[in-house]
């Protein structure tokens, strides 16, 4: 009876995590990608790199997550690590599925600002489910967890610092590839944990912050 109960608990936990990752993946593919905006996340960094690397967003996200998982699996707790491994693998798989089913998907709102707002609202649902189950979507969540554990930083500050590094890395990529770089004081959404966002356009890249 106990074994059956454990199997049932594991199955329900897997279903919940899968639904949460599907929500996050949908937010990225249907709202963040069409907006051509990169928030400070691994998916956002993947969007920036997809402008220069001849790989699909799903492949870039998978590579970045695998590198962080190798580091984070041995530094975070076992439960958090195992769940994050699962969600990090499922995220690019869902993105790849969406790329096949909905190729060259355009904006549903025809507004970059509305796309970003919808992304924030939808992705917040998925992330809240994961954090409530002692899991994460990988990427910067792993970096923040490591910083929180070993540098004794608050998770909010750790997410902000790691997000800032992503934004600056995106700027560096544009400089290395001889792209124009412009700085804009346009305030970002206060609901984002990181004060930095990256906006990739044809004529350059815009950093904005609170």
Image (cartoon, grey):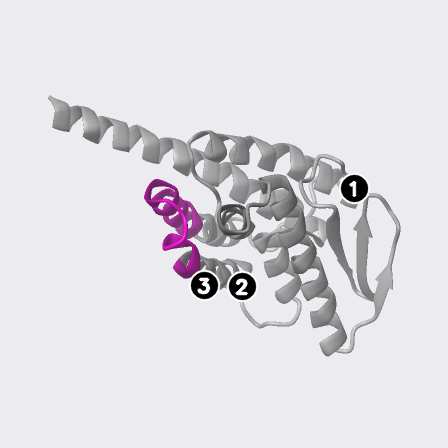
Residue visible at 79% across and 65% down?
A: 202
Q: Is residue 84 magenta?
A: yes
Please report the bounds of the magenta region as a residue range.
70-90
At numbered mark 3, what does the secondary structure look like: helix, strand or loop? helix
- Judge whether residue 111 can be spotted in this image: no
Question: What residue does disc 1 label?
Answer: 113
Camera-near label (3 vs 1) is 3
Residue 21 vertical position relative to residue 179 in the rendered view, above or below? above
**Cα–Cα gap, marks 3 and 1:** 32 Å
Identify the main secondary structure in magenta. helix
Q: Earlier in the sequence, mark 2 or mark 3?
A: 2
| Position of residue 15 in the picture relative to residue 200 (left or right) | left
**Cα–Cα gap, marks 2 and 3:** 17 Å
**Cα–Cα gap, marks 1 and 2:** 24 Å
Residue visible at 47% across and 35% down?
A: 130
At numbered mark 1, what does the secondary structure look like: helix, strand or loop? helix
Residue visible at 65% across and 44% down?
A: 157
Q: Is residue 37 magenta?
A: no
What's the mark number on residue 67? 3
At numbered mark 2, what does the secondary structure look like: helix, strand or loop? loop
Residue 102 is situated, as x and y percent measured from the top left of the image, at 54, 49
* Label 3 crowd (10 A; few <14 / some 14-19 / many >=20): few
| Position of residue 20 in the picture relative to residue 121 (left or right) | left
Q: Identify the image quadrant of the N terminus.
A: top left
What's the mark number on residue 9? none
Question: What residue does disc 2 label?
Answer: 56
Residue 208 is situated, as x and y percent measured from the top left of the image, at 81, 51
Which residue is nearer to you in this view: 132 or 150?
150
Residue visible at 66% across and 62% down?
A: 48
């Amino acid at each position: 009876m106990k074994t059956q109960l454990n199997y049932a608990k594991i199955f329900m936990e897997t279903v919940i995590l899968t639904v949460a990752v599907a929500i996050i993946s949908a937010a990225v593919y249907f709202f963040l990608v069409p907006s051509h905006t990169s928030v400070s996340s691994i998916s956002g960094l993947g969007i920036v790199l997809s402008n220069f690397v001849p790989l699909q967003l799903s492949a870039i996200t998978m590579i970045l997550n695998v590198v962080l998982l190798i580091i984070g699996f041995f530094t975070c707790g076992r439960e958090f690590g195992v769940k994050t491994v699962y969600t990090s693998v499922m995220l690019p798989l869902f993105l790849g599925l969406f790329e096949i089913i909905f190729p060259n998907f355009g904006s549903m709102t025809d507004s970059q600002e509305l796309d970003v707002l919808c992304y924030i609202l939808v992705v917040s649902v998925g992330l809240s489910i994961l954090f409530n189950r002692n899991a994460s979507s990988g990427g910067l969540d792993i970096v923040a967890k490591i910083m929180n554990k070993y540098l004794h930083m608050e998770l909010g500050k750790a997410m902000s610092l790691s997000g800032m590094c992503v934004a600056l890395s995106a700027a560096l990529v544009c400089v290395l590839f001889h792209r124009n770089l412009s700085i804009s004081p346009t305030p970002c959404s206060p609901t984002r944990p990181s004060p930095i966002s990256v906006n990739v356009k044809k004529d350059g890249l815009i950093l904005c912050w609170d």
